[in-house]
Image (cartoon, helix red, strand yellow):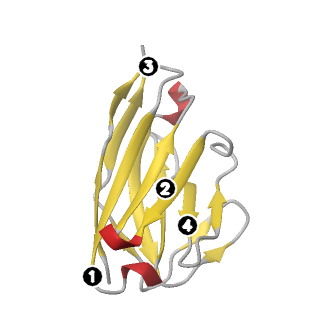
Amino acid sequence: QVRLVESGGGLVQPGGSLRLSCAGSGRAFSSYAVGWFREAPGKDREFVAVIAWDDDIYYGASVKGRYTISRDNANKSVYLQMDRLKPEDTGVYYCAADLNLALSGDWWNLSGSGSWGQGTQVTVST
């Protein structure tokens, strides 16, 4: 399994931007689908975005058009550029990686080979 470490969270005003990074370890990083979920207080975890090993990209409905996911396999990193942020974007953002990409509706089902990072807090508020 790949190990994941998120960074880049913080406090930002509505309408602002933030860029999250997910640094991975392991020799097969480029073979993984890597993406993001978020969890707001009192709410279920929500799928945000994923980029596959062949650079196919999928976004959750609530962030499509505002967020951009990208990857840099040479540096074993995936990035999430978040623009036009809203207070409802607040939550803990988790990086995830899996050798499989099982999408079902607006959800990414991680398999037994999936990995999670520890999360980074994003707060959108005045």
Q: How far from the left and from the top, in percent, is residue 15?
A: 54, 22
Quarter of the rendering containing residue 72: bottom left
Residues at discs 1 and 2 in contact (Cβ within 8 Å): no
Which residue in the structure is indicated by mark 2? 37
Q: Residue at x 66, y 43 (%)?
A: 62
Secondary structure beneath dot 1 equals: loop
Quarter of the rendering containing residue 117: bottom left
Which residue in the structure is indicated by mark 4? 51
Q: How far from the left and from the top, in percent, is residue 5?
A: 26, 61
Secondary structure beneath dot 2 equals: strand
> Does label 4 or label 2 sit earlier along the sequence?
2
Which residue in the structure is indicated by mark 1? 26
> Does label 4 or label 1 sit earlier along the sequence?
1
Q: The N terminus appears in which quarter of the rendering? A: bottom left
Of the two numbered discs 4 and 2 in the rendering, the one whose residue sits closer to the viewer: 4
Of the two numbered discs 3 and 4 in the rendering, the one whose residue sits closer to the viewer: 4
Secondary structure beneath dot 4 equals: strand
Secondary structure beneath dot 3 equals: loop
Nearest the eye: 45 or 102? 102
Which residue in the structure is indicated by mark 3? 13
Q: How far from the left and from the top, in percent, is residue 47?
A: 57, 56
> Does label 2 or label 3 sit earlier along the sequence?
3
Could you give the CA–CA distance between mark 1 and mark 2, rounded to whole angstroms? 21 Å
Q: The C terminus appears in which quarter of the rendering? A: top left
> Does label 1 or label 2 sit earlier along the sequence?
1
> Is residue 29 toward the left or the right of residue 3 in the image?
right
Q: Which mark is residue 85?
A: none
Q: Which class describes the residues within 10 Å of circle 1: few (<14), some (14-19), or many (20+)?
A: few
Q: Residue at x 43, y 80 (%)?
A: 30
Could you give the CA–CA distance between mark 4 and mark 2, rounded to whole angstroms? 12 Å
Nearest the eye: 121 or 20? 20
Above or below residue 81? Residue 21 is: below
